[in-house]
Structure formats: C-alpha cells, structure tokens
Amino acid sequence: MPHAPSADAAEPVALFAEPTAVVKPGWTVNLSLATLAVFMAFMTPIQILLPLQLEHIDPQDKNAALSLVTGLGALVAVLANPIAGAWSDRTTSRFGRRRPWILGGALAGAAGLMVTASQHTVAGVAVGWCLAQAGLNAMLAGVTTPIADRVPLRQRAQVSGWTGLMQSVGLVVGALITTTLVTGVGSGYGTLAVLTVALALPFVLCHGEPALPRALRPAFDARAFARSFRVSPRQHPDFGWAWLTRFLINLGNALGTLYLFYFLADAVHYGDPGTGVLILTLIYTLCAAVTAVPVGALSDRVGRRKGFVVLCSVVMTAAALLLALVHTWPSALAAAAVLGAGYGIYLAVDQALVTQVLPQAADRAKDLGVINIANSGPQVLAPALASPIIAHLGGYTGLYVAAALAILAGGFLVRRIRGVA
C-alpha cells in the first residue's frame, strides 16, 4: 500500500490509538537486528557458554549448577521485564518511550555478560548472569513493544515472524561465533557483549518515535504501581488464556532445550556436543525461517491466529516425542527440522495474537512484560522439573515426554480465547 503514511510520522495525539500506518522494510529490519541482539545474548550463554563454563568449574555437579544459574537468571527476568516495561510506558524522554530502554538495557546487559565471563565460582557466575538478565530484559521490554505500538493488524504477524525468527537466528549466530570464530568462554562473552550494543544502535538511531507528553503520564503511586502488574484473568480472560498458552508452550520448549548439550553428550553419545548443538540449531533455524514469515503473512491475510497456534503445537509435540523415543543422531536431526517448522509458526502468530488481547494501550509495555513472564517463568520452573525427571522419571525419555505434554496442552488451550479468530 504505497500511499499509506510512514509509521515514523506518527503524532503524539495518536500515541495510544490502534496503529494504521504501514511500517517500512527498514524499520522491520532494524527492529529485527535489535531483537537478534537480545536473543543472541540470552540464548548463546544458556546453550553453550554457561554449560562449558560450569563444567569447568564443577564437573561433578554440572547439571545442578546449570539449573541453579539459569533458574536464578530467569527469576530475575520474571521481575525485570514487566518492571522495565511499566517504566517504559511512563518514560517522557524526547527520544520516545522505547528507545532509551533499548540502548540502556543493551549497555547494562553487555556489562553483565562481561561480569559473568570473569567469574570462577558457581556463585559468581550466578551473580553475573543475573546482572546480564536484568539489563537484557530491560532491552527486551523495549524491543517487543514497538510491534503493538506501531504495526497495523494487517502487517502484524508478518513483522512478528521476522522479529520472532531472531530468537533462533540469535542462537545460530551466537553458536557460530562461540564455536568457530572465537576461542574460549571469555572471548565468547566479550564478543556477545559488543554485538549486543552494536546491533541495538540502528533502530535506536534511525527511527524516531512520538514522545509521551508529561501531561499524559499518571502520577506515581507505589501501591497502584505494584497492583498494576496483576492483570485479572476474570476481567481480561483472553489475556489470561493467551498467557497460559504461551507459558505451557515455552515450558515444553525450555524442558526440551535446557539440557540439549548434555543430551547429545550423555544419551546420543555425539562426539562433539557443542558442534552438535550448532548443527541442530542451524537445521532448526532454517526450518523456522521457512514457516515463520510465510505463515505470518497468511495469518494476516486470512485474519486468523488460533488455528495456527494449534497446528504448531501438534507439530512441536511430534518433534518432542521423537526425541523422547529415539536417542540417535539422525533422529535428533529430524526432530530439529520438525521442531523448527512448528516453532516458526508459533513465533509469528502467537506474538501477533498477544498484541490483540492487551487490556490497555497506555500499558502496552507493562502488559507485554507480564506476558513475557510466560517466556522467562518456564526458565525458572524447567530446571526444577527437569533435574528430578532425568534422575527419577525416565531420564531423557521422561524429560521429552513431559515437554510434549506441556506443548500440546498449551496449543489446545488457545481455543479458549474468544476475542481473536
């Protein structure tokens, strides 16, 4: 639609209105780069750097150490993301509400990664990773909200497909960097820190956004601020069901990916599990790319979201069951392809769906932060569930069966949402 006005021309008076101006490709590209920075900094340590670092520090209890560090980091994320989002909604900077948090979060996250790199105890790694999570989640609050702020419904799933794809692309790029381009855990963290800031800059510097007039910022009341983080599922049932759907699907995903490095080493007996993770992630990402943007565009065209979420849950469940039942390298390759195809659908459509159930336009970043607890919350719960499942409930078979059940339940609960087709 070439004659539609640019989103960068939005006026403050339309700050809380449903966006109608088509966003340009450059806007989507630069937001995707900033999103890539966040997830590269999130996922690469969890999948590669932290397991290597903790295996060196405490080889006998590496599973418990990884669970502790990632669980504490995810707990920080649960708190930091909605709080940063709420302050983003109230930010009256002349540079807008989101860009200061993107840049500030990138700088703080990079500093946390450097602190993590310098640690030689499990406790020190935990502290550094928690600092990194706090900064990166402030950045995440900034990069997730522009889709709700600026992208019209007829573009939303397609744009969400591009930004959502950055989750897996971030891990691929991070894995390539930390396994082939640099040597050592410390240099891996340092490179991620630099790239986190560098990739945030194009969006921060090139795309203006309307500032929040001070007259529209509500007076601060500590009790009301604290209460605002509870979004009643009775008053906003669609929001509640969307949150639960995302929580369960991400719980299944977290159960399936948290111990992938150790799964390849201990169950599949793959000779180089770090390289194995990279290969599986490349396949996963390629298949996600094949489905994310085209299915997002199809969802925008037909105006439907829920059926695609159900479809992706069925596909992802099949992949988890394959991992549960067959512990071989070829089956892991097949599962990565199937899981990636399903998750690509999920990344595009679920994010678009969530933006359509937000209770109030003035609180978009805060409410998306609450929704994002359904991303980080499973990272807290998954280690607590995974370790005893592996030890007492069937090992890796039990772990992937549990992942399959969580994903399937989440996909079918999306049908309880009434306000979105």
Image: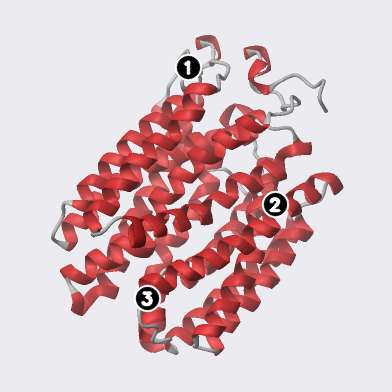
Residue drawn at (68%, 71%) of the image:
315
Residue pictured at 76% horizontal, 56% vertical = 306
**Between disc 3 and disc 1, whose residue precedes?**
1
Q: In this view of the protein, can residue 313 be seen by the observer?
A: yes
Residue 374 visible in the current orientation: no
Between residue 63 and residue 295, name the one nearer to us.
295
Q: Position of residue 103 (x, y in %)?
A: 40, 30
- What's the residue type where badge 1 is placed? Phe
Q: Answer with the quarter of the image where residue 277 lies.
A: bottom left
Mark 3, residue position: 273
Question: What's the distance in space between the residues labelled 3 and 1, CA to CA?
Answer: 45 Å
Q: Is residue 143 above or below residue 190?
A: above
Residue ID for mark 2: 349
Decide which of 181, 410 is in the foreground and name it: 181
Q: Name which of mark 1 and mark 2 comes first in the sequence.
A: 1
Residue furthest out toward the left: 120
Kind of residue at badge 2: Val
Mark 3 is surrounded, within 10 Å at the Cα level, by few (under 14), some (14 to 19) or many (20 or more) other residues, namely some
Q: Which mark is residue 396?
A: none
Q: Residue drawn at (19%, 76%), measured in percent from left and top?
A: 59
In whole angstroms, how far apart are the C-alphas of marks 1 and 2? 30 Å
Element under disc 1: loop
Q: Is residue 382 above or below residue 82?
A: below
Mark 2 Cα shell of 10 Å, populated few (<14), some (14-19), many (≥20): many
For label 1, count other residues whose C-alpha is less than 10 Å away and answer few (under 14), some (14-19) or many (20+).
Answer: some
Q: Nearer the viewer, residue 221 or 131?
A: 131
In the drawing, what numbered circle is on residue 95? 1
Could you tell me which residue is drawn at 49 percent across and 84 percent down? 329
